[in-house]
Amino acid sequence: MMIHIDGSYGEGGGQVLRTSLSLAAITGNPISIYNIRAGRKNPGLAAQHLTGVRATATICDAEVRGDTLGSMMLEFIPGGAVKAGNYTFDVTQARQGGSAGAITLVLQTILLPLALATGDSQVTLKGGTHVPFSPPMTYIEQVYLPTLKQMGVEVEVKLNSWGWYPQGGGVVELLVSGGRKLAGVHLGERGDLQQVRGLAIATELPSHIPQRMASRAENLLTEAGFKHAIKPVREKGVAPGTGLFLTAEYENSLAGFSALGRLGLPAEKVAQMACEELLKFHQTGAVVDEHLADQLLLPAALASEKSEYHVAEVSTHLTTNAWVIEQFGLARVTVDEGEKLVTVKPLISFPFEH
Ligand SMILES: Nc1ncnc2c1ncn2[C@@H]1O[C@H](COP(=O)(O)OP(=O)(O)OP(=O)(O)O)[C@@H](O)[C@H]1O
């Protein structure tokens, strides 16, 4: 039976679409989404979303209607179970003249369908790897995937080329182990902060930029009394770009914070922005950062047991994603706004019957 999703619900952004696509592929359920990204200034499918649609359609052999740039309506009818395989998806194929669309979001759309499918997959993604309003690839490597690993998802990733806004051109390779069964997560206590790991990176820019970012971050973290290991790195790239990516490594959990550089923004200021985010999080005492909070819902809904985690902030991304998951009847998500506690109780056990 076709599931109808109102893309304007809550946050009304791209995540409503991406979660729906992942779940359509996993369950084999046809979906129809309308009002796609109606909450955004530039509604409808942008290059990143269209790439996500095409990538998901490829892996489950879906019949698709409405898959054009700017489309606010999509019908997606899976043709069968998700097929493991060797795939390449490039956001520039969705938009002539190029795009820095976030491939990390495309990655998150197809990752769980491939992890649950029979057989291993090799995927190459091309586009933006570190662009605003999306998880930086470094966050995927250092926070998202290690947390999913605790749930039983096995992925190896390699960043072959950095892709910044507006040029894009980044390349990421993934090896996804198939046939996984997911366990729940229990992140109620984070334990002590062991260290802050950091990458101060610049491509096609002078080496003083990562060095200045690193030393400002080191000063701020030392002042806060944190142990740290910040690495200044300068690399070749397709275009200039810079940023600081921090991971707070607690005894039981990981949280990520970052800031991207841009022309006119001093390296020290970039460092300060990322450190302030980390310090703000640390003071809340929470276990899961605001972004991981919404990203963990999908794997938790597909697990064989209950998950529970304590978040820094209840964002509309979180409540909206919970709503999308409930539209598929897969899990009951409870968000205790006072305690900032998210509980996900799967209702259907894997493997899903097609
Ligand atoms: N700095 C960050 N670190 C980690 N994750 C992030 C960061 N910024 C955004 N995200 C994540 O990126 C996702 C963005 O979802 P959103 O619905 O806004 O998608 P989008 O496709 O960019 O859509 P839109 O253009 O409609 O905003 C969310 O899961 C959010 O948690």
Image (spheres, rainbow, N blue to C red):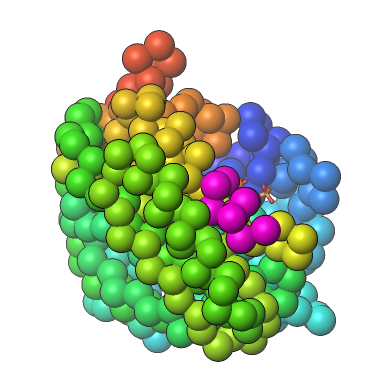
- 188 relative to 228, above or below: above
- 107 relative to 205, above or below: above
Image location (x, y in percent) of residue 151: 21, 51
Q: Quadrant of residue 99?
A: bottom right
Residue range highlighted in magenta? 266-273
User: From this viewpoint, which residue is outermost toward the top?
Assistant: 338
Is any atom of residue 325 visible in this view? no
Residue 45 vs residue 215: left or right? Answer: right
Image location (x, y in percent) of residue 282: 36, 33
Which is more toward the observer, 302 or 209? 209
Residue 119 vs residue 59: left or right? Answer: left
Residue 342 vs residue 18: left or right? Answer: left
Q: Which quarter of the image is occupied by the C terminus?
A: bottom left
Which is more toward the observer, 53 or 176? 176
Residue at position x 49%, y 40% from top?
Answer: 277
Q: In which quarter of the image is residue 156?
A: bottom left
Residue at position x 46%, y 84% from top?
Answer: 160
Image location (x, y in percent) of residue 60: 45, 69
- 47 relative to 18, above or below: below
Residue 9 vs residue 113: left or right? Answer: right
Residue at position x 64%, y 34% from top?
Answer: 11
Q: Quadrant of residue 311?
A: top left
| 250 inside magenta stretch | no
| 271 inside magenta stretch | yes
Q: Main secondary structure of the magenta part?
A: helix
- 227 relative to 158, above or below: above
Which is more toward the observer, 326 or 123? 123
Is any atom of residue 38 visible in this view? yes
Residue at position x 67%, y 82% from top?
Answer: 239
Image location (x, y in percent) of residue 280: 46, 32
